[in-house]
Image (cartoon, rainbow, N blue to C red):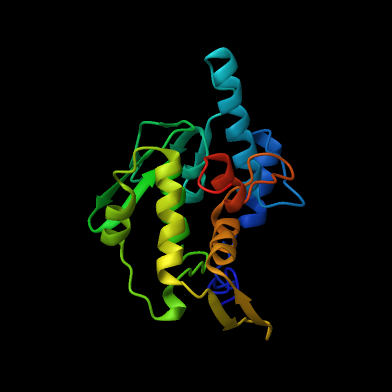
């Protein structure tokens, strides 16, 4: 499936342009070009985290409803509100540790490195990221939660992610892509593809890959 091909491009807010102009004129808004706005938010959020480690104070707080941001160290505020009340009024302090995941009405939620692990393995239907669905594998929120919630270290966590892909695809994957290309990948290459689709770049030209992450934590040499 093509990345984000499930989006209905017709569902565009009628006053989107006017809203952007208003934010620029009255609230010092900046138009982001070259990358998506949420990628720029990630850079600012990570910059805030780095400044916090140096000074004890965040230089930025990220206000968004984008769940992808929850995998990046930052000070995160969920701006979702109904009838004038925020659903989660307290900011989430996301450091560079494991974070937490939990089940909420049968759906896995969370933040930190564990949330990144969830996104890699469970996928993200809102972006059409599908690590296993098209290969006839059944894997739900509860299974995903039990796979990662009790990980004790980053090495333990990302070893579990790698083992999940190896278990699913011991011989790798083979498929016809949306553009007609016939693709063959081993299990690690496929895991790297999923990582690339869910990982938010923290700095300009961020070189991070899943393989480099595994090497950093001693899972691979």
- x, y percentage for residue 107? 29, 57
Residue that lies at the very extreme toward the right in this rendered image: 34
Residue that lies at the very extreme toward the left in this rendered image: 105
Q: Residue at 68%, 38% (x, y): give it.
A: 29
Q: Residue at 47%, 49% (x, y): give it.
A: 116
Count of residue discs: 0
In this orientation, which residue lies closer to the viewer: 78 or 152? 152
Q: In this view, does 144 lie above or below 201?
A: below
Q: Is residue 141 above or below residue 67?
A: below
- x, y percentage for residue 129? 51, 66
User: The N terminus appears in which quarter of the rendering?
Assistant: bottom right
Say which quarter of the image contains residue 3. Answer: bottom right
Q: Residue at 34%, 43% (x, y): give it.
A: 151
- x, y percentage for residue 28? 68, 33
In this orientation, which residue lies closer to the viewer: 102 or 217? 217
In this orientation, which residue lies closer to the viewer: 8 or 129? 129
Q: Residue at 29%, 43% (x, y): give it.
A: 150
7 left or right of 160? right
Residue that lies at the very extreme toward the front in this rendered image: 221
Q: Is residue 79 visible?
A: no
Q: In this view, does 175 lie above or below 116?
A: below
205 left or right of 86? right
In this orientation, which residue lies closer to the viewer: 61 or 18? 61
Q: Is residue 149 visible?
A: yes
- x, y percentage for residue 39? 64, 47
């Amino acid at each position: 499936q093509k990345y984000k091909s499930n989006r209905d491009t017709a569902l565009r807010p009628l006053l989107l342009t006017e809203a952007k102009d208003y934010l620029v004129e009255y609230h010092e808004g900046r138009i982001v070009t070259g990358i998506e706005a949420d990628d720029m938010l990630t850079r600012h959020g990570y910059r805030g985290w780095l400044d916090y480690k140096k000074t004890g104070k965040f230089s930025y707080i990220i206000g968004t409803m984008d769940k992808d941001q929850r995998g990046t160290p930052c000070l995160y505020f969920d701006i979702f509100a109904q009838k004038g009340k925020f659903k989660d009024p307290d900011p989430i302090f996301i450091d560079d540790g494991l974070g937490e995941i939990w089940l909420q009405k049968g759906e896995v939620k969370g933040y930190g490195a564990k949330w990144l692990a969830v996104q890699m393995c469970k996928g993200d239907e809102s972006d059409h990221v599908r690590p296993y669905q098209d290969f006839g594998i059944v894997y739900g929120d509860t299974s995903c939660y039990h796979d990662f919630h009790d990980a004790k270290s980053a090495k333990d966590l990302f070893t579990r992610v790698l083992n999940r892909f190896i278990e699913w695809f011991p011989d790798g994957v083979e498929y016809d892509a949306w553009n007609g290309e016939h693709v063959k990948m081993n299990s690690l290459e496929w895991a790297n593809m999923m990582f690339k689709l869910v990982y938010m770049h923290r700095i300009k030209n961020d070189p991070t890959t899943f393989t480099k992450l595994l090497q950093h934590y001693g899972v691979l040499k």
